C-alpha cells in the first residue's frame, strides 16, 4: 500500500468524525501554541532589550565614583584622561558625564524637564550619536568652555520653531548657542532621548559649582577587550581610592549577556512546562486511537481478509495518528504565533516568529503522533482476521 | 509465491488432506474438523453444507487461509499453505481468493469504487490501474453508474453485488462465498445465486458455504459436514445430498413404525 493512499484514508477517517478529531487535536494544539507563544514572546523581549542596549553603544563601559568628602584620595578628570592615554590598546573615547539640575529656558518659555548633561567631544562616538545639522562639541569648545550646545529633535520641534541652529538656550541663566541638532532617536516625546541637551562638561562643572566628576563613559577598543578593560579600570580605581571611596565599573554588553542568559533559562523552563501538555496531548491521541481500533475491528478484519498485511494496517493507523497530531501542530503554530504577536503589540515590542521553534514543534508533534500511535496501530495489525470479521 | 499455472481444467486447485482443527476448552478438546480430506478441481462449483456446529465455518476459514489447521496439509494451487504465517496468508488471500460474505462487509465510509479497489490496493497496483480494474469489475455486476455512491445508499442485493465485484477485482482463481444469500430476501438471493452460476459458467472455481439445502442444490457438487466429518461428497442432484443421517431419525415417525414400536 502506498503512503499517498494511506494519507487519503486517514484524512477520510478524520473527516468522518470531525468533532472527535478536533478534541483529540486539542491537547497538541494547546501544547504547541503555548510553546510557540512563550518562545516568541521571550525572543521579542530579548530583541527589544538588545536593541535598546545596542543604541547605547555596545562596547561602552560606565564608571561611577563616590568619594567621601573629607578624604584626600580622589580621582580627577586628568587622572582618568591619563589612564585612558596609557591604555590606548584597551580604551578610547573617554567622556566625563555631568548632569545638571536646573531651569532651562528658551526666551521666556521654560522647558519641560529636558535632560542636560555636560560631556566631552568624545561623547558622540561613545553613544553613537548622529547629527542631522551642524556639528557635535569639539575639543576647543570643552577646553575654552565655549557656551555652545547640541540638542535633540524634541527641543527643536517644540521650543525652537523647528529650526535649531544658532538659537539661544538659557541654562541656569547662562546663554548657550545651538551648534548641532541630533537625529531623532526615540519617538520624539518629552520622555524620549530626543529631549536632551549636551554642553561641554567644563561648563557643566562650573554651573554645578564643583570640579569633581562622579560619572564617566569610556569605550573598549573592541568587544574582546571589554572584560580586560573593565578589570584594568577596576584595578586603577582600587589603587587610587584604596578603600576611601566606592566605585562601580559596568559594561553594558556584559550586563546584556547576563540578562540574556537569565532570560533564556526562564524561557526554556516555561517552554518545557508547556511541553508537558504536548505529552498529555500525545496520551490523548493514543487513547482515541485505541478506541478507534476497537470500533473499527470489523473494518480491519475486512481489510485483512482482502490481503492487507500487518504493516499495511500498522501504517494506516500510524499515519492517522501522525496526521492528527501534525494538523494539531500546524493549528497550534498558527495560534501560538498569533498570540505571540498580540502579546508583542500589548508589550509594545515587535515579535517576529522565528523558524526554529516552528520546525521543532511541528517535528515534535508529528513524532508524538508516531510514538503514541504505534501501540494502537500495532494492536490493530495483530488482530486475528477471523475474530475481527465476526466483531460487531 | 508460485505462479498460477495454466494447467488443464480438471487439475486439483484445493487439496485438503486429513485436516484436523482442535480447540481446547479448559480440559476438554473440541474437534471442529475431524480428519477431513477433500479435493476441489479448477472450475468446480462446490457447496459445503452443514448445520451450525458441523464445522463448515472452520472449514471455510481454513480454505480461505484465515486460519491454519492443527494438523493435516492444505495445498492451494500446489502450494502448501497450511503452515503459513499471518502475512504470508494475507498475500495468498490477496492473490488466490475472492471473498463474498453474508454481511457484504463493505467499508461504510468508502465509495463503491474504493471498496472494490481494496484488494488491488493491497496487491500494490498503481492508482490508475486500480481504478480501471475496479470500474471494469463494477461493470460486470452492473453497478458502474453508482461507483461514487456509498454502500449505505444501496439496497442489500446491490451491496452484495458490490462485494462480488470486489471478490472478482483481483481475478483470483477461487471465489469463496460464505452464506451469500443469508441476509437477502428470496428474490435477490436467487439473483445472487444465478450470478454465481454465471461466474461458474465463465470458468471460475466457486466454493459456497451454506446451511440451506435449497441453495446448496444450485451448486454442481455438495460436500456435507456433520460433527467435523464429511458425511456426503457427490453430485448435488442426488437425493442423499440434501438429507443428513440424523435427519432420518429426526423425521416424524411413520404410522407403520409407530405400530411396530407399539
Image: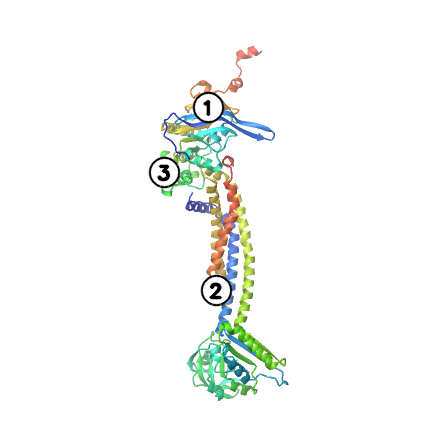
Q: Say if residue A247 shows up in the picture.
A: yes
Q: Are marks 1 and 3 on the same chain?
A: yes
> What residue is disc 1 on?
B223
For numbered disc 1, what is the local secondary structure? strand
Residue B120 vertical position relative to residue A222 in the rendered view, above or below: above
Q: Chain of mark 3?
A: B
Neighbourhood count class around disc 3 (C-alpha, 10 Å): few under 14, some 14–19, many 20 upward: many
Task: From the viewer's perspective, tell me whether residue B205 is left or right of residue A34.
Answer: left
Q: Quadrant location of the N terminus of chain A?
A: top left
> Looking at the rendered structure, which numbered label has been put on residue B254?
none
Tag 1 near tag 3, CB within 8 Å: no
For numbered disc 2, what is the local secondary structure? loop
Q: Which of the 4 quarters of the picture holds residue A259?
A: bottom right
**Earlier-in-chain disc, 1 versus 3:** 3
Q: Chain of mark 1?
A: B
Residue A296 vertical position relative to residue A104 in the rendered view, above or below: above
Position in image of residue A236 (x %, y %): 57, 79
Residue at 54 percent of width and 46 percent of height: A287
Who is closer to the viewer here, B2 or A297? B2
For numbered disc 3, what is the local secondary structure? helix
> What residue is disc 2 on?
A351
Tag 1 near tag 2, CB within 8 Å: no
Q: Are marks 2 and 3 on the same chain?
A: no
Position in image of residue A285 (x %, y %): 52, 48
Residue B124 vertical position relative to residue B230 in the rendered view, above or below: below
Q: In whole angstroms, how far apart are the C-alphas of marks 2 and 3?
A: 55 Å
**Numbered disc in front, either 1 or 2:** 1
Residue A78 vertical position relative to residue A4 in the rendered view, above or below: below
Q: In whole angstroms, how far apart are the C-alphas of marks 1 and 2?
A: 79 Å
> What residue is disc 3 on?
B133
Amino acid at each position: 500500500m502506498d503512503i499517498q493512499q494511506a494519507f487519503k484514508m486517514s484524512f477520510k477517517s478524520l473527516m468522518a468524525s470531525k468533532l472527535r478529531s478536533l478534541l483529540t487535536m486539542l491537547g497538541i494544539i494547546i501544547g504547541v501554541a503555548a510553546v510557540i507563544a512563550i518562545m516568541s514572546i521571550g525572543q521579542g523581549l530579548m530583541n527589544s532589550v538588545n536593541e535598546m542596549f545596542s543604541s547605547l553603544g555596545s562596547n561602552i563601559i560606565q564608571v561611577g565614583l563616590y568619594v567621601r568628602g573629607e578624604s584626600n584620595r580622589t580621582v580627577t578628570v586628568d587622572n582618568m584622561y591619563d589612564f585612558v592615554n596609557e591604555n590606548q590598546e584597551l580604551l578610547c573615547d573617554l567622556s566625563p558625564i555631568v548632569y545638571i539640575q536646573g531651569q532651562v529656558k528658551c526666551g521666556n518659555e521654560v522647558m519641560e524637564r529636558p535632560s542636560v548633561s555636560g560631556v566631552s567631544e568624545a561623547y558622540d562616538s561613545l553613544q553613537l550619536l548622529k547629527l542631522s545639522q551642524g556639528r557635535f562639541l569639539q575639543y576647543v569648545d570643552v577646553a575654552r568652555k565655549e557656551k555652545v550646545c547640541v540638542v535633540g529633535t524634541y527641543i527643536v520641534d517644540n521650543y525652537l520653531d523647528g529650526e535649531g541652529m544658532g538659537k539661544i538656550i538659557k541654562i541656569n541663566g547662562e546663554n548657550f548657542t545651538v551648534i548641532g541638532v541630533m537625529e531623532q532617536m526615540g519617538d520624539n516625546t518629552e520622555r524620549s532621548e530626543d529631549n536632551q541637551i549636551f554642553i561641554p562638561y567644563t561648563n557643566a562643572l562650573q554651573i554645578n559649582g564643583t570640579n569633581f566628576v562622579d560619572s564617566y563613559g569610556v569605550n573598549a577598543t573592541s568587544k574582546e577587550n571589554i572584560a580586560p578593560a573593565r578589570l584594568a579600570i577596576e584595578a586603577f580605581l582600587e589603587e587610587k581610592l584604596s578603600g576611601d571611596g566606592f566605585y562601580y565599573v559596568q559594561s553594558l554588553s556584559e550586563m546584556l549577556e547576563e540578562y540574556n542568559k537569565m532570560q533564556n533559562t526562564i524561557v526554556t523552563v516555561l517552554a518545557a512546562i508547556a511541553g508537558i501538555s504536548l505529552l498529555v496531548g500525545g496520551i490523548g491521541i493514543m487513547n482515541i486511537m485505541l478506541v478507534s481500533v476497537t470500533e473499527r475491528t470489523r473494518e480491519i478484519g475486512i481489510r485483512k481478509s482482502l490481503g492487507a498485511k500487518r504493516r499495511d494496517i500498522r501504517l494506516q493507523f500510524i499515519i492517522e495518528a501522525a496526521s492528527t497530531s501534525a494538523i494539531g501542530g500546524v493549528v497550534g503554530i498558527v495560534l501560538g504565533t498569533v498570540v505571540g504577536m498580540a502579546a508583542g503589540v500589548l508589550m509594545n515590542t515587535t515579535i517576529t516568529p522565528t523558524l526554529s521553534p516552528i520546525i521543532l514543534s511541528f517535528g515534535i508533534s508529528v513524532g508524538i503522533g508516531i510514538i503514541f500511535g504505534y501501540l494502537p496501530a500495532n494492536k490493530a495489525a495483530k488482530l486475528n482476521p477471523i475474530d475481527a470479521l465476526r466483531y460487531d | 509465491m508460485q505462479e498460477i499455472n495454466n494447467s488443464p481444467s480438471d487439475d486439483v486447485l484445493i487439496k485438503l488432506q486429513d485436516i484436523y482443527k482442535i480447540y481446547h476448552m479448559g480440559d476438554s478438546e473440541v474437534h471442529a474438523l475431524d480428519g477431513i480430506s477433500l479435493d476441489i478441481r479448477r472450475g468446480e462449483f462446490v457447496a459445503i453444507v452443514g448445520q451450525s456446529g458441523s464445522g463448515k465455518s472452520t472449514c471455510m476459514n481454513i480454505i480461505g487461509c484465515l486460519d491454519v489447521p492443527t494438523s493435516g496439509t492444505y495445498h492451494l494451487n500446489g502450494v502448501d499453505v497450511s503452515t503459513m504465517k499471518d502475512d504470508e496468508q494475507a498475500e495468498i488471500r490477496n492473490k488466490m481468493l475472492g471473498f463474498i460474505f453474508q454481511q457484504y462487509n463493505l467499508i461504510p465510509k468508502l465509495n463503491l469504487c474504493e471498496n472494490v479497489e481494496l484488494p488491488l490496493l493491497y496487491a500494490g497496483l498503481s492508482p490508475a490501474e486500480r481504478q480501471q480494474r475496479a470500474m471494469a469489475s463494477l461493470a460486470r455486476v452492473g453497478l458502474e453508474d453508482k461507483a461514487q455512491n456509498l454502500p449505505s445508499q444501496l439496497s442489500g442485493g446491490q451491496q452484495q453485488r458490490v462485494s462480488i465485484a470486489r471478490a472478482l477485482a483481483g481475478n483470483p482463481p477461487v471465489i469463496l462465498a460464505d452464506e451469500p444469500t443469508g441476509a437477502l430476501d428470496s428474490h435477490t438471493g436467487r439473483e445472487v445465486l444465478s450470478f454465481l452460476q454465471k461466474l461458474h459458467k465463465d470458468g471460475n472455481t466457486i466454493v459456497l458455504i451454506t446451511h440451506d439445502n435449497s441453495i446448496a442444490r444450485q451448486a454442481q457438487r455438495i460436500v456435507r459436514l456433520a460433527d467435523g466429518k464429511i458425511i456426503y461428497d457427490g453430485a448435488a442432484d442426488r437425493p442423499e445430498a440434501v438429507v443428513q443421517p440424523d435427519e432420518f431419525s429426526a423425521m416424524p415417525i411413520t404410522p407403520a413404525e409407530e405400530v411396530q414400536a407399539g
